[in-house]
Image (tube, rainbow, N blue to C red):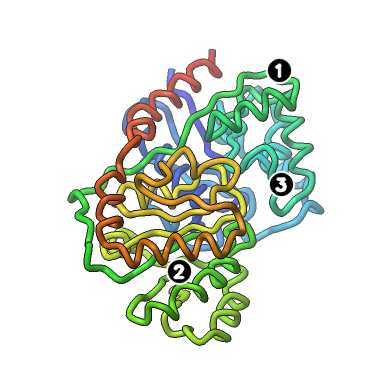
Amino acid sequence: MTRHIAFFSGDITRSGGTENVSIMIANALVEETTDRISFVSLFEENPEPFFAIDGHIERHTVYPTVTHGIQHYFDTVRRLRALVRQHDIDVLIDIDGILDMYSLPLKRRTGVKVISWEHFNFNQNPGVPYRKLTRRWAARRADAIVTLTEADKRLYESNLKLRCPAVAIPNPMQTVAPAPRYDAESKLIISSGRLTYQKGFDMLVDVAAKVLPQHPDWRWLVLGEGEDREMLERKAAGTDHAGQLVFHGRADNMGDYYRKAAMFVMTSRFEGLPMVLLEAKAYKLPIVSFDCETGPAEIVADGVNGDLTAVGDIDATAAAINRLIDDAERRASYAAHALDGAERFGKAAIIEQWRRLLNDVCK
């Protein structure tokens, strides 16, 4: 029997890591299963999704225009219930745990199964303080909870009385074709992600101030959009290396930048399992990253293919980058070992974990 599996998103047309990995999983499922796959967004702000969605995957929206705010809660639940019924959706996969607040009330009257997919970590509640409440609600009412790391799974199991299984399924790492070749002559640092508080680009500007003046022939590109862009550009403009640090905006050809870069730097305050680090790893880039609570330490082998520094430690992070800039052999060694440990992020193995979970949920 064909099942209808719907990935529920705030806006699947966005360019964030959550949207990226959700589309990767959905595209793989529609290729490898007989399930009907779709995306349901609260709204779609962009005419086309940033990441390519397989043409066999349907897209639906709860609202025809951008609609924010808890004040629309009951209307959102009503609209989502009607959509689930209209399209005979069997499973809703909430790709942000906060969306559980809309999907869990549907279980009683529609019979839809709900999988709560946590993309942050248990101790972080970005943007909305009631995220803690939805996690407790999911522990009681969801059909499964998916975390990105074993560490986060343990946080759920030790802090909540779970009435559903918690399963750790990491994000998949893409296979790059043609195979990347590290450019040892590159003098380009790149970083990417949504320009938001979580991603810590304000601290990146501080790090750059301790790196770029010492290396006037190097450039640092920040790729991505977000609400903090104007503030970050003002902050960067007030330095004496403003021309070297560039906020490039949204990039449609990320692979081109990875191939040209000497290293990748991430200064996030918190993460789940950051897709940008998996992408950098796939392109064999040395990585310098804050060692936030979950994610980086499962991707980067410190001192082998990258350097991990304490969250917020501007001096240590700048020192790690300066050391890599000044030591081409170290950069080359990190690049040579970039794929160490990559097997656990293999796409085929991760899709199989999702297939098993969906089979268990739909029994």
Q: Is residue 82 visible?
A: no
Which structural element holds mark 3?
Answer: loop
Tag of residue 222: 2
Image quarter (top left, top right, bottom left or bottom right) of the N terminus: top left
Q: Nearer the viewer, residue 154 or 141?
A: 154
Dot 1 or dot 3, earlier in sequence = 3
Q: Quadrant of residue 132?
A: top right
Position of 270 relative to 206 (above/below): above
Nearest-to-viewer mark from 1 and 2: 2
The residue under label 3 is 125
Disc 1 + disc 2, Cβ < 8 Å: no
Above or below residue 151? Residue 203 is below
Residue labelled with disc 1: 163
| Amino acid bearing label 2 | Val
x then y, percent, for residue 178 = 18, 50
Q: Is residue 298 left or right of residue 253?
A: right
Res 312 quadrant in image: bottom right
Horizontal side of 342 relative to 165 (left or right) equals left
Crowdedness near tag 3: few (<14), some (14–19) or many (≥20) residues, C-alpha within 10 Å:
few
Q: The disc labelled 1 sits on which kind of residue?
A: Arg
Q: Earlier in the sequence, mark 1 or mark 2?
A: 1
In the image, taking residue 326 as reference, residue 233 lies left or right, namely right
